[in-house]
Amino acid sequence: MKFLMVGAGLSGAVIGREMAEAGHDVTVIDARDHVAGNCHTERDPETGVMVHVYGPHIFHTDDDEVWEYVNRFMSFEPYKNRVKSTTQGAVYSLPVNLHTINQFFGKTMRPDEARAFIEEQADTTITDPQTFEEQALRFVGPDLYEAFFKGYTEKQWGCSPTDLPASILKRLPVRFNYDDNYFFHRHQGMPRDGYTPMVEAILDHPNITVRLETPYDPSMRDDHDHIVWSGPLDGYFGFEEGRLGYRTLDFERFTAKGDWQGCAVMNYGDRDVPFTRITEHKHFSPWESHEGSVLYREFSRECGPDDIPYYPIRLVEEKAMLADYVARAEAETNVTFVGRLGTYRYLDMDVTIREALDTARAFLKSDATGAAFPIFVNHPL
Ligand SMILES: Cc1cc2nc3c(=O)[nH]c(=O)nc-3n(C[C@H](O)[C@H](O)[C@H](O)COP(=O)(O)OP(=O)(O)OC[C@H]3O[C@@H](n4cnc5c(N)ncnc54)[C@H](O)[C@@H]3O)c2cc1C
C-alpha cells in the first residue's frame, strides 16, 4: 500500500517506520523545514548548545517497549528533571516536597509532622471540590496555593483557577519526602545528540521518502491509499466548525556567558512576573560543556490562527466543537487521525510512541483481515 504521513513528528515517523518495515511504501510530509515536530532540537551555531526549539522536552516512561524502541535509534544519557520555582522573593524546590514545605513555613518537620501540618492548612469545609481553586485549597490550603499554584496556573491557562475544572489537579500535588525528581517513571533520559537525529534515524528506511516544507494538499489523496493525519483535526476540515482552542507559547531568547541560572528550568510563580518559566538549555545536556548559554523566557497566551498550537484547552466549549469534528471524521474513509493534534489531546512523547506503535499494529491487522482501517485508534473523546 501507499501511505501518506502528514507530519514528521514522532507520530508520523513511528507509524511510517512500522509500515515501511512491513513492506509498504511511505511518504512523510511536513510543512516545516525539519523533522521531529515539536520535539525538534538544534545546536545553536553561536554557543554549540543543544536547544529544545519548541520548549523543553524530557523523555520519561514506564513502558519498556517504548524505551527499547527509542534506544534502538539513539543512545540516551541519564537525566533527571529537577525544577525550581522563584516565588514571593525566594527560590524553592518543585514539585512541592518536604524541603519546599519546611523552607516555606520556616520549619524542620519530618514527613508525618508535615502531613498533619498540611492537613491543618487544608480547607476541609470544601467537601466536593468543583474547580481547580477549590481542589487546591482542599489539598494544600491558601498559602501554598497562592505561592505555587495560583499565579502560575493563571499565566499558563490565561484564566482564573476558579474557571478551571478540579480534575486538572487530580492527586495531592505535594510530596512528604525530599524527592525532587519531577517524574516517577523508571526510565528517564535525554537523547545524546538531540531528538531530531533520533527521528531522522527512525525515518531512515529505503521504503520511506521524506518531503519537508510540504504542506498537505487534498490532491495528494489521489496518489495514496491511506492518509495518516497528525496535523490539527480541525485543520483537516478547513476549520469549518470553528477553531479548537489551544494555548500557544512565545519564547524570548537570550544568551549569557557561563551558567546563568544554575538549573534547566526555573518557574516563576508570581502573577506580576509575566513569563511562566526560564529554560537554560545547556543543563539538558550535562555531559557537554559550553562557554556560552542559551535561555528562553516562556510566555503563554491564547493561540491565534497563525500561531503554533501547543496545549489543547479541552474545556466544555471546546469539547462540544470537538464532538462535531469527531462526527465528521468518522464519516471519512482512508484516513486515520493520530497524535497530539490529530486527536486534540496533550500527549507525552512516550504515550505518542505507544499510540503510534498500536496504530501501526491496528493497520497491519486490518491489512491482514481486509477490514477497513480505523479512523481513530485512540479516540479524542
Ligand atoms: C511545550 C511542550 C513541552 C513538552 N514537553 C514534553 C516533555 O518534557 N516530555 C514529553 O514526553 N513530552 C513533552 N511534550 C509533548 C511532545 O511535544 C509530544 O508528545 C509530541 O510532539 C507529539 O508528537 P506528534 O507527532 O503527535 O505531534 P507534533 O510533534 O506536533 O508533529 C506534528 C507535525 O505535523 C506537521 N503538520 C501539521 N499540519 C500539517 C499540514 N497540514 N501539512 C504538513 N505538515 C503538517 C507539523 O508541522 C508538525 O511537525 C511537550 C509538549 C509541549 C507543547
Image: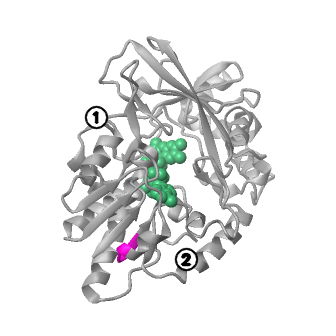
Sequence-first disc among 2 and 1:
1
Instruction: Give the residue at x 68% y 61%.
Output: 243
Nearest the eye: 52 or 353:
52
* The residue stretch that appears in magenta: 223-227
Q: Which mark is residue 171?
A: none
Nearest the eye: 262 or 19:
19
> Which of the 4 image quarters holds residue 288?
top left
From the viewer's perspective, tell me whether residue 1 is left or right of residue 93: left
What kind of residue is marked 2?
Answer: Ala
Instruction: Give the residue at x 44% y 40%.
Output: 57
Instruction: Give the residue at x 68% y 37%.
Output: 152
Image coordinates of residue 166 in percent, x first then y, are: 70, 56
**Residue 80 lies in magenta, yes or no?**
no
Q: Can you identify the residue that label 1 sits on?
A: 192
Q: Which mark is residue 329?
A: 2
Residues at circles 2 and 1 in contact by the CB criterion of under 8 Å = no
Q: Is residue 157 above or below residue 286?
A: below
Quarter of the image with the C terminus in it: bottom right
Image coordinates of residue 201 in percent, x first then y, are: 24, 48
Image coordinates of residue 188 in percent, x first then y, are: 35, 42
> Which of the 4 image quarters holds residue 328?
bottom right
Quarter of the image with the N terminus in it: bottom left
Q: Is residue 369 above or below residue 57?
A: below
From the viewer's perspective, tell me whether residue 224 is left or right of residue 244: left
